[in-house]
Image (cartoon, helix red, strand yellow):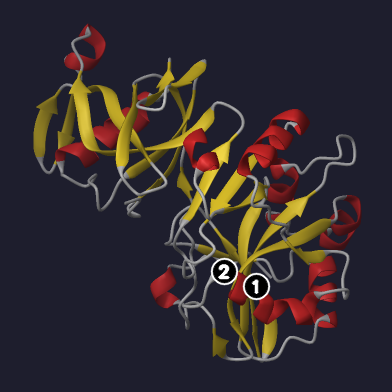
Amino acid sequence: MQQCCLPLEKKPREYNFVEVLPTTESILNKPGLIFQRKFDGVSAEVIAEGDLRIVGKGITRGRLSDYTLKFPELMEDLKKLNLPDGTDFLPEIVVIDNETGMENLSLVQARTGRESNVSLYSKLYPAVMIIHDVVSVGRRDVTGENYLARADALKPLVAGKSNKIFFIGSSTDGRAEWERVQRLKFEGIIARDPKAALGRGVWKLKRELSEDVFCIGEFTPSISDTLSIFEYEVGGHKKTGLFANLVCYQLTSTGSIFHVCDVGGGFSMQDRVAIQKMLDLGQISKDKPLVLEVKANARFEDGKSSGIIHSCVSGMIKHGTSAL
């Protein structure tokens, strides 16, 4: 079976996406939140409706992948749960590197792309499934309930039945969790508002200086010879000059935006032209931000302002999903 990858509008049902927004260390002091370890895996959705399916989530809302046959060891344990029809939950699939004892994103990506010897790879690089959130249990929609109520609706069906499928742990001490992440060199933490409905009130804080930022359409034009005289065509018209830097923001825990960096390095010429065309056409905005992953040499935060020093883009994550 080839990997399924179809536009959402061609799917027979609506799938669930949870936007996890970047934040800063100030969120560790915000009362009322719970904190969870951030793993380095792939997002998925498990659906029990007549049969069992694992649907893989990409970085955009437009494409999905069928992981049902990619992870036979997880499917075997999912069947042990005897999930009633109408059950739907959102896990992360993680593969542990035997050499380091840590999750390895490249290994799980190798599993999702494997078309042959799937059974062999499931033994060499076994996966685990960490449940982050719940959509429904036995046709009872829990998306409007608070986080703990959503989790409690599914936990009795999962507890003690599998050593490969389990719920993520939580803590109310954000500072202690962050210190643990730094000490053990984990990827980061997730901060969550336990009173929020599904898809709301979720933030991420990464340990390494590799962070997600977003551009809402602001940029500084280039004055360098190479970029300022570059000619390209957009909308049937010839134009000259590419951007020097994209003005980028992050969100606070209260939902307000703040400027963190101007990103100009690390773009290929092809990416720079493509982004400039989107800027020209007004396709990057608050409603349709361009989300980038940036690497930096340092970060500062003084309680009033926050920023990334010497930023350089390392990847374009997604475009077209509101971050506000």
Query: Could you say whether the residue bearing mark 1 is in a helix, strand or loop?
Result: helix
Q: Residue furthest front?
A: 31
Residue 239: horizontal and vertical position, in percent?
11, 28
State which quarter of the image contains the N terminus. bottom right
The residue sitting at 66% across, 81% down in the picture is 153
Q: Nearer the viewer, residue 248 or 150?
A: 150
Toward the viewer: 150 or 119?
Answer: 150
**Quarter of the figure with residue 291:** top left
Q: Give the alpha-carbon distance from disc 1 to disc 2, as whole Å.
A: 6 Å
Is 107 placed left or right of 100 in the picture?
A: left
Mark 1 closeness class: few <14, some 14–19, many ≥20 residues within 10 Å: many
Q: Is residue 304 above or below residue 192?
A: above
Left or right relative to 321: residue 243: left
Q: Residue at x 78, y 65 (%)?
A: 166
Q: Which residue is mark 2?
A: 147
The answer to whether residue 187 is seen in the rendering is no
In the depicted structure, whether residue 259 falls above or below residue 102: above
Residue 10 vs 42, above or below: the answer is below
- Residue 247: where, in percent of width, then height? 27, 29
Q: Are marks 1 and 2 in contact (CB under 8 Å)?
A: yes
Q: Amino acid at mark 1?
A: Ala
SS assignment at label 2: helix
Amino acid beneath label 2: Tyr
- What residue would you read off at disc 1? 151
